């Protein structure tokens, strides 16, 4: 169940990031969803005692949300810097 919840958290984080950043390109939207998904899975795994089996605790869900938001924010800063150069 934890794995399914982390997939949902990561996918929604990436999708919301593409809406907030007003991303129009299909590849960029999928990239943001992928970043949110991978970071959510890693952070949730680390915060949930290294397992996806069983339930997902509040700490694991919070870590997944915060880590996804931070990674996507960093990605957008990186993209913005490369666009200026």
Image (cartoon, helix red, strand yellow):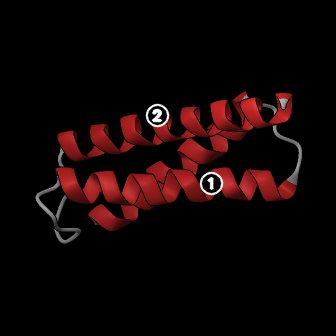
Residue 17 or residue 5, whichever sits in front = 17
The part of the image, by quadrant, that contains residue 51 is bottom left
Q: Judge left or right: residue 45 versus residue 8.
A: left
> Which disc, if any, is residue 83?
none
The residue singled out by tag 2 in the image is: 70
- The quadrant of the image that shows the N terminus is bottom left
Query: Can residue 56 be seen in the rendering of this structure?
Result: no
Residue sitting at x 78%, y 52%:
28
Q: Please tell me how many numbered marks the rendered image carries.
A: 2
The part of the image, by quadrant, that contains residue 5 is bottom left
In the rendered image, residue 39, in percent from the top left (x then y), is placed at 43, 53
In the rendered image, residue 82, in percent from the top left (x then y), is placed at 77, 37
Residue sitting at x 60%, y 46%:
14
Q: Residue furthest right?
A: 24
- The quadrant of the image that shows the C terminus is top right
Residue sitting at x 15%, y 64%:
50
Secondary structure of the residue carrying numbered label 2: helix
Circle 1 or circle 2, nearest the eye:
2
**How far is mark 1 from mark 2, CA to CA?**
14 Å
Within-10-Å neighbours for mark 1: few <14, some 14–19, many 20+: many
The residue singled out by tag 1 in the image is: 33
In the rendered image, residue 81, in percent from the top left (x then y), is placed at 73, 30
In the rendered image, residue 22, in percent from the top left (x then y), is placed at 81, 32
Instruction: Work out whether mark 1 precedes mark 2 in sequence or the reverse, and give the earlier one.
Output: 1
Residue 58 or residue 23, whichever sits in front = 23
Secondary structure of the residue carrying numbered label 1: helix
Residue sitting at x 52%, y 50%:
36
Within-10-Å neighbours for mark 2: few <14, some 14–19, many 20+: some
């Amino acid at each position: 169940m934890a794995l399914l919840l982390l997939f949902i958290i990561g996918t929604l984080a990436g999708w919301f990031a593409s809406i907030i950043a007003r991303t129009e390109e299909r590849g960029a939207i999928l990239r943001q969803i992928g970043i949110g998904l991978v970071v959510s899975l890693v952070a949730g795994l680390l915060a949930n005692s290294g397992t996806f089996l069983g339930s997902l605790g509040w700490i694991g869900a919070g870590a997944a949300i915060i880590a996804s938001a931070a990674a996507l924010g960093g990605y957008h800063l990186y993209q913005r810097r490369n666009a200026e150069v």
